[in-house]
Image: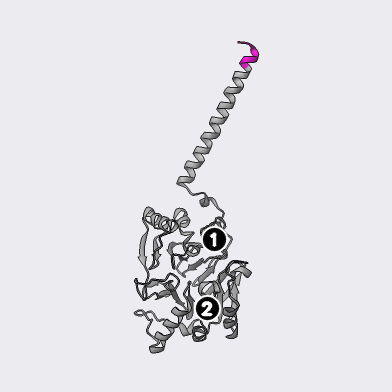
Amino acid sequence: MSARSEARRRRRVLRLLRTALVCLIALAVALLFSIVPYRSFLSAAQIAARGEGEMRLHFLSVGQGDCTIVEFPGGDVLVVDAGDGSFEANNAIVSYIKGLNVRSLSLLATHADIDHYGGFSELLRVFQADKFYLPVLSSPTSAYQGLLAAIVREGCETQTLTRYDVIGDATGAYVVCISPHGVDETDSNAASTMLYMSYAGVNILLSADADAAREKSILSELQLAEDILDSGIYRVRPDETHILKVAHHGAAGSSDADWLAFLSPEAAIVSCGAGNGYHHPAGEAMARLAGLGTQIYRTDELGNIMLTVRGGSYTITYA
């Protein structure tokens, strides 16, 4: 064999070896990420530490979707909805949770619309969740069935939330489900899990995607008896709401005038995406709130919004 032929043979062998090495590295990386999700390596968001005795709610800017993270005073964390599952939203939520001092993590989907549950499968991959609170209505979509499969795969305990169910905290903070009434609901938005929260004399209402008909129905019940939504020792008084998480991203078909007047919230949080195709929030819904003197905070304008409750008062900040 000539020297030239030998050199060509060696070059071919080296190319084959390099190709094999690249393939082995790619395979190793793929195997690694199948075991350890790559979002586990995301850096943690820079968030100031929660003060002693504080409860915080973080309303994340995740585009046209919802994600509210509740930090109880004892360090337990409850994630209420998880955005639409987009690349950007998943990165933002994972990074944010990593920036909190989480003692125990629970997840809660208010209903089976993908802009509310889309990111939960990834959260189950990245974090160890102790419990998953499910909505009363399921969904036939492959994405939602994938979420249910992920819950089973991770061995996460589940509970379907209906009226009077309570998520309590040893510090005295509590969350009461005030709607839906039962598991026989048929409309996804109307059956959204509405949550009333209370801590240190400050009350918050998370409305999910409830529509005006559901708001009117609850209002008619409350007019019969002010304690009709109480759950055992847990007091529920929507007319004493300080902060309202506005229903359905501020859609015109929610935030009924009589309901808002009954709540008379001091502050309202709207979760919506900038320039969204639904034109949320609707001008008429915002006008109804503004007419009550309610201070409005929008994620499409302000980014992440943080509510801090301590000692009977609250502050709202944003970034």
Residue displayed at 51% across by 82% down: 256
Viewer-proximal residue, 69 or 88?
88
Can you name the residue that lies furthest to the top here?
1
Q: Residues within 10 Å of mark 1 (few under 14, many from 20)?
A: some
Q: How is the image coloured?
A: one colour
Q: Position of residue 6 (x, y in %)?
A: 61, 15
Residue displayed at 46% across by 45% down: 34
Residue 8 got which mark?
none
Residue range highlighted in magenta: 1-6
Residue displayed at 44% across by 84% down: 219
Q: Which residue is mark 1?
A: 96
Q: Which residue is mark 2?
A: 243
Task: Mark yes or no: residue 51 visible.
Answer: no
Q: Amino acid at mark 2?
A: Ile
Q: Position of residue 150 (x, y in %)?
A: 40, 55
Q: Amino acid at mark 1?
A: Tyr
Screen quadrant of the C terminus:
bottom right
CA gap, disc 1 and disc 2 = 22 Å
* Circle 1 SS class: helix
Task: Mark yes or no: residue 156 visible.
Answer: yes
Toward which corner of the image does residue 275 lie, by quadrant?
bottom right
Q: Position of residue 30 (x, y in %)?
A: 50, 42
Would you say residue 109 sits in the magenta stretch?
no
* Circle 2 SS class: strand
Residue displayed at 62% across by 19% down: 8
